[in-house]
Image (cartoon, rainbow, N blue to C red):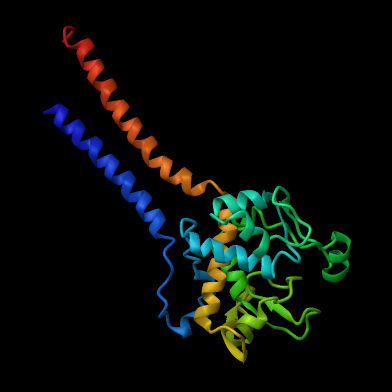
Amino acid sequence: MRTDRIVAALLAALLAAAAAHAAEEGAGAPAAAGAPEAAKLGADWASWHANTNVTDMPSVQRGARNFVSYCLGCHGLKYERWSRLGQDLSIPPDLLEKELLPPGDKGTEYIMTSMPAKDAETWFGKAPPDLTLMARARGRNYLYQFLKTFYVDPGKQTGANNLRLPATAMPHVLSELEGLKRPVFRDVMTRGEGGKFSHEQVFDHFEMIAPGRLSAAEYDGFVRDTVNFLDYVSEPTQAARRALGVWVVLFLLVFTWLAWLVKREYWKDVH
Protein backbone atom coordinates (compact mmCIF):
# COMPACT_ATOMS: atom_id res chain seq x y z
CA MET A 1 0.00 0.00 0.00
CA ARG A 2 2.81 2.39 0.83
CA THR A 3 4.36 1.76 -2.59
CA ASP A 4 1.04 2.52 -4.29
CA ARG A 5 0.74 5.77 -2.40
CA ILE A 6 4.28 6.82 -3.32
CA VAL A 7 3.74 6.01 -6.99
CA ALA A 8 0.47 7.94 -6.94
CA ALA A 9 2.23 10.90 -5.33
CA LEU A 10 4.98 10.81 -7.96
CA LEU A 11 2.44 10.74 -10.78
CA ALA A 12 0.49 13.61 -9.22
CA ALA A 13 3.67 15.69 -8.93
CA LEU A 14 4.55 14.97 -12.56
CA LEU A 15 1.09 15.95 -13.73
CA ALA A 16 1.31 19.16 -11.70
CA ALA A 17 4.66 20.02 -13.29
CA ALA A 18 3.28 19.36 -16.75
CA ALA A 19 0.19 21.46 -16.02
CA ALA A 20 2.36 24.32 -14.77
CA HIS A 21 4.44 24.17 -17.96
CA ALA A 22 1.30 24.16 -20.09
CA ALA A 23 -0.12 27.08 -18.16
CA GLU A 24 3.10 29.07 -18.64
CA GLU A 25 2.98 28.45 -22.38
CA GLY A 26 -0.73 29.16 -22.54
CA ALA A 27 -0.24 32.46 -20.80
CA GLY A 28 1.42 33.68 -23.97
CA ALA A 29 -1.67 33.09 -26.10
CA PRO A 30 -2.84 36.28 -27.82
CA ALA A 31 -5.77 38.08 -26.28
CA ALA A 32 -9.15 37.82 -27.93
CA ALA A 33 -9.27 39.92 -31.08
CA GLY A 34 -12.73 41.13 -30.20
CA ALA A 35 -11.76 42.89 -26.98
CA PRO A 36 -13.87 46.02 -26.47
CA GLU A 37 -12.23 49.15 -27.82
CA ALA A 38 -13.27 51.03 -24.69
CA ALA A 39 -11.13 48.71 -22.56
CA LYS A 40 -8.10 49.46 -24.72
CA LEU A 41 -8.52 53.22 -24.38
CA GLY A 42 -9.76 53.24 -20.79
CA ALA A 43 -8.23 54.08 -17.46
CA ASP A 44 -7.12 50.47 -16.87
CA TRP A 45 -3.96 50.87 -18.97
CA ALA A 46 -1.76 49.91 -15.98
CA SER A 47 -3.33 46.43 -15.97
CA TRP A 48 -2.78 45.68 -19.68
CA HIS A 49 -0.86 42.46 -20.31
CA ALA A 50 1.33 41.69 -23.29
CA ASN A 51 0.16 38.04 -23.47
CA THR A 52 3.06 37.05 -25.70
CA ASN A 53 4.65 33.67 -26.29
CA VAL A 54 8.23 33.25 -27.52
CA THR A 55 7.35 29.81 -28.94
CA ASP A 56 5.05 31.56 -31.44
CA MET A 57 7.72 31.73 -34.13
CA PRO A 58 5.71 33.70 -36.74
CA SER A 59 5.06 36.37 -34.10
CA VAL A 60 8.75 36.59 -33.16
CA GLN A 61 9.70 36.80 -36.83
CA ARG A 62 7.25 39.65 -37.40
CA GLY A 63 8.63 41.32 -34.29
CA ALA A 64 12.17 41.12 -35.73
CA ARG A 65 10.92 42.82 -38.89
CA ASN A 66 9.20 45.51 -36.80
CA PHE A 67 12.33 46.13 -34.73
CA VAL A 68 14.59 46.52 -37.76
CA SER A 69 12.09 48.82 -39.47
CA TYR A 70 11.23 51.13 -36.57
CA CYS A 71 13.65 50.64 -33.66
CA LEU A 72 17.12 49.84 -34.98
CA GLY A 73 17.72 53.40 -36.09
CA CYS A 74 18.07 54.41 -32.41
CA HIS A 75 18.30 51.21 -30.35
CA GLY A 76 20.75 48.33 -30.63
CA LEU A 77 20.89 44.74 -29.37
CA LYS A 78 24.55 44.56 -28.42
CA TYR A 79 24.40 41.01 -27.00
CA GLU A 80 22.69 39.41 -30.01
CA ARG A 81 24.34 38.51 -33.31
CA TRP A 82 22.55 38.56 -36.63
CA SER A 83 23.57 34.96 -37.26
CA ARG A 84 22.12 33.81 -33.92
CA LEU A 85 18.89 35.63 -34.67
CA GLY A 86 18.65 33.97 -38.07
CA GLN A 87 19.36 30.54 -36.61
CA ASP A 88 16.86 30.80 -33.76
CA LEU A 89 14.13 32.31 -35.93
CA SER A 90 14.67 29.86 -38.82
CA ILE A 91 15.51 32.66 -41.27
CA PRO A 92 17.69 31.51 -44.20
CA PRO A 93 20.98 33.46 -44.52
CA ASP A 94 20.06 34.89 -47.92
CA LEU A 95 16.68 36.10 -46.65
CA LEU A 96 18.28 37.48 -43.48
CA GLU A 97 20.74 39.50 -45.55
CA LYS A 98 18.06 40.70 -47.95
CA GLU A 99 15.32 41.65 -45.47
CA LEU A 100 16.97 42.44 -42.13
CA LEU A 101 20.71 43.10 -42.37
CA PRO A 102 21.54 46.80 -42.78
CA PRO A 103 23.80 47.62 -45.75
CA GLY A 104 27.43 46.88 -44.89
CA ASP A 105 26.69 44.69 -41.85
CA LYS A 106 27.76 41.04 -41.70
CA GLY A 107 25.88 38.14 -40.20
CA THR A 108 28.61 37.54 -37.62
CA GLU A 109 28.32 41.07 -36.21
CA TYR A 110 26.26 42.16 -33.22
CA ILE A 111 23.02 44.03 -33.86
CA MET A 112 24.09 47.62 -33.35
CA THR A 113 22.39 50.89 -34.15
CA SER A 114 23.99 53.23 -36.65
CA MET A 115 23.15 56.34 -34.60
CA PRO A 116 26.25 57.89 -32.97
CA ALA A 117 25.84 58.23 -29.20
CA LYS A 118 26.96 61.87 -29.20
CA ASP A 119 24.39 62.82 -31.83
CA ALA A 120 21.69 60.99 -29.86
CA GLU A 121 22.58 62.94 -26.72
CA THR A 122 22.35 66.19 -28.68
CA TRP A 123 18.98 65.35 -30.21
CA PHE A 124 17.24 63.58 -27.30
CA GLY A 125 19.19 64.70 -24.25
CA LYS A 126 20.61 61.20 -23.70
CA ALA A 127 21.52 58.20 -25.80
CA PRO A 128 18.66 55.72 -26.36
CA PRO A 129 19.20 52.56 -24.27
CA ASP A 130 20.25 49.20 -25.63
CA LEU A 131 17.22 46.90 -25.68
CA THR A 132 18.82 43.47 -25.43
CA LEU A 133 17.87 42.95 -21.78
CA MET A 134 15.03 45.45 -21.56
CA ALA A 135 12.31 42.78 -21.40
CA ARG A 136 14.07 41.10 -18.47
CA ALA A 137 14.76 44.38 -16.69
CA ARG A 138 11.32 45.97 -17.12
CA GLY A 139 9.06 43.09 -18.06
CA ARG A 140 6.93 42.38 -21.11
CA ASN A 141 3.89 44.19 -19.73
CA TYR A 142 5.90 47.36 -19.15
CA LEU A 143 7.07 47.40 -22.78
CA TYR A 144 3.57 46.70 -24.04
CA GLN A 145 2.05 49.48 -21.94
CA PHE A 146 4.83 51.88 -22.94
CA LEU A 147 4.22 51.40 -26.66
CA LYS A 148 0.45 51.72 -26.20
CA THR A 149 0.26 54.86 -24.05
CA PHE A 150 1.92 57.57 -26.14
CA TYR A 151 -0.17 60.69 -26.57
CA VAL A 152 0.09 64.15 -28.09
CA ASP A 153 1.71 66.73 -25.80
CA PRO A 154 2.50 70.09 -27.47
CA GLY A 155 4.51 71.12 -24.41
CA LYS A 156 7.20 68.51 -25.08
CA GLN A 157 10.07 68.96 -27.50
CA THR A 158 9.13 65.77 -29.35
CA GLY A 159 5.41 66.64 -29.31
CA ALA A 160 4.58 63.45 -27.44
CA ASN A 161 4.44 62.10 -23.90
CA ASN A 162 3.78 58.74 -22.31
CA LEU A 163 1.71 57.47 -19.39
CA ARG A 164 4.00 54.55 -18.59
CA LEU A 165 7.14 56.71 -18.66
CA PRO A 166 6.15 60.37 -18.16
CA ALA A 167 8.48 62.97 -19.69
CA THR A 168 10.10 60.34 -21.89
CA ALA A 169 12.68 61.63 -24.36
CA MET A 170 11.52 59.14 -26.99
CA PRO A 171 9.28 60.47 -29.76
CA HIS A 172 6.23 58.48 -30.80
CA VAL A 173 7.91 56.79 -33.75
CA LEU A 174 4.88 54.54 -34.31
CA SER A 175 2.39 57.39 -34.61
CA GLU A 176 2.02 56.82 -38.35
CA LEU A 177 0.78 53.32 -37.55
CA GLU A 178 -1.32 53.98 -34.45
CA GLY A 179 -2.46 57.51 -35.18
CA LEU A 180 -2.57 60.45 -32.78
CA LYS A 181 -4.52 60.48 -29.54
CA ARG A 182 -4.90 62.84 -26.63
CA PRO A 183 -5.59 62.09 -22.98
CA VAL A 184 -8.83 63.03 -21.29
CA PHE A 185 -8.56 63.75 -17.58
CA ARG A 186 -11.22 64.00 -14.88
CA ASP A 187 -11.16 66.13 -11.78
CA VAL A 188 -10.98 64.19 -8.52
CA MET A 189 -11.31 65.64 -5.03
CA THR A 190 -8.74 64.25 -2.60
CA ARG A 191 -8.17 64.87 1.09
CA GLY A 192 -4.61 65.69 2.06
CA GLU A 193 -2.83 66.27 5.35
CA GLY A 194 -4.79 68.25 7.89
CA GLY A 195 -8.08 67.27 6.29
CA LYS A 196 -7.76 69.81 3.50
CA PHE A 197 -9.36 68.95 0.17
CA SER A 198 -7.62 69.48 -3.14
CA HIS A 199 -8.39 68.91 -6.79
CA GLU A 200 -6.35 66.40 -8.77
CA GLN A 201 -6.38 65.64 -12.48
CA VAL A 202 -6.63 61.88 -13.04
CA PHE A 203 -6.32 60.19 -16.42
CA ASP A 204 -9.64 58.81 -17.65
CA HIS A 205 -9.23 57.64 -21.26
CA PHE A 206 -7.64 58.36 -24.62
CA GLU A 207 -9.42 60.12 -27.46
CA MET A 208 -8.27 59.53 -31.04
CA ILE A 209 -7.76 62.74 -32.99
CA ALA A 210 -6.13 61.35 -36.15
CA PRO A 211 -6.17 57.77 -37.45
CA GLY A 212 -3.05 55.85 -38.36
CA ARG A 213 -2.36 53.37 -41.13
CA LEU A 214 -3.37 50.45 -38.90
CA SER A 215 -6.61 49.73 -37.15
CA ALA A 216 -6.61 49.44 -33.36
CA ALA A 217 -6.52 45.63 -33.55
CA GLU A 218 -3.73 45.64 -36.15
CA TYR A 219 -1.63 48.07 -34.11
CA ASP A 220 -2.18 45.98 -31.00
CA GLY A 221 -0.88 42.93 -32.89
CA PHE A 222 2.10 44.96 -34.15
CA VAL A 223 3.03 45.93 -30.58
CA ARG A 224 2.60 42.39 -29.24
CA ASP A 225 4.85 40.99 -31.98
CA THR A 226 7.51 43.60 -31.23
CA VAL A 227 7.39 42.91 -27.49
CA ASN A 228 7.50 39.18 -28.20
CA PHE A 229 10.71 39.66 -30.19
CA LEU A 230 12.29 41.71 -27.40
CA ASP A 231 11.28 39.00 -24.94
CA TYR A 232 13.05 36.41 -27.10
CA VAL A 233 16.18 38.58 -27.39
CA SER A 234 16.36 39.01 -23.61
CA GLU A 235 16.82 35.22 -23.23
CA PRO A 236 17.10 33.32 -26.53
CA THR A 237 17.16 29.91 -24.78
CA GLN A 238 14.11 30.40 -22.55
CA ALA A 239 11.81 28.18 -24.62
CA ALA A 240 14.32 25.31 -24.51
CA ARG A 241 14.88 25.91 -20.79
CA ARG A 242 11.19 25.59 -20.01
CA ALA A 243 10.80 22.45 -22.11
CA LEU A 244 13.87 20.88 -20.47
CA GLY A 245 12.55 21.75 -17.01
CA VAL A 246 9.71 19.24 -17.33
CA TRP A 247 12.16 16.43 -18.08
CA VAL A 248 14.42 17.46 -15.22
CA VAL A 249 11.51 17.28 -12.79
CA LEU A 250 10.54 13.89 -14.24
CA PHE A 251 14.08 12.59 -13.79
CA LEU A 252 14.21 13.78 -10.19
CA LEU A 253 10.89 12.12 -9.41
CA VAL A 254 11.92 8.81 -10.95
CA PHE A 255 15.33 8.96 -9.25
CA THR A 256 13.66 9.65 -5.90
CA TRP A 257 11.39 6.65 -6.41
CA LEU A 258 14.35 4.39 -7.29
CA ALA A 259 16.32 5.65 -4.30
CA TRP A 260 13.36 4.83 -2.05
CA LEU A 261 13.21 1.29 -3.47
CA VAL A 262 16.95 0.81 -2.83
CA LYS A 263 16.56 2.13 0.72
CA ARG A 264 13.67 -0.26 1.37
CA GLU A 265 15.70 -3.21 0.05
CA TYR A 266 18.70 -2.39 2.26
CA TRP A 267 16.64 -1.89 5.42
CA LYS A 268 14.13 -4.69 5.06
CA ASP A 269 16.19 -7.09 7.24
CA VAL A 270 16.71 -4.44 9.94
CA HIS A 271 12.98 -4.00 10.43
The answer to which image quadrant residue 192 occupies is bottom right
Q: Is residue 240 above or below residue 256?
A: below
Residue closer to the observer: 219 or 190: 219
In the picture as drawn, the residue positioned furthest to the left comes out as 1
The answer to which image quadrant residue 116 occupies is bottom right
Q: In this rendering, does residue 125 appear at all?
A: yes
Q: Residue placed at 58% from the left, 65% from the top?
A: 63
In the picture as drawn, the residue positioned furthest to the bottom comes out as 209
Determine whether, in the image, residue 145 is placed left or right of residue 106: left
Quadrant containing the N terminus is top left
Q: Residue placed at 51% from the left, 66% from the top?
A: 50
The answer to which image quadrant residue 203 occupies is bottom right
Q: Is residue 219 above or below residue 7?
A: below
Q: Position of residue 111 (x, y in %)?
A: 71, 55
Q: Position of residue 21 (x, y in %)?
A: 37, 49
Q: Position of residue 130 (x, y in %)?
A: 72, 57
Label total for image: 0
Q: Residue placed at 62% from the left, 81% from the top?
A: 177
Q: Position of residue 159 (x, y in %)?
A: 76, 82
Residue closer to the observer: 39 or 65: 65
Q: In this rendering, does residue 142 appear at all?
A: no
Quadrant containing the C terminus is top left
Q: Residue placed at 70% from the left, 60% from the top?
A: 101
In the picture as drawn, the residue positioned furthest to the front comes out as 94
Determine whether, in the image, residue 170 is placed left or right of residue 89: right
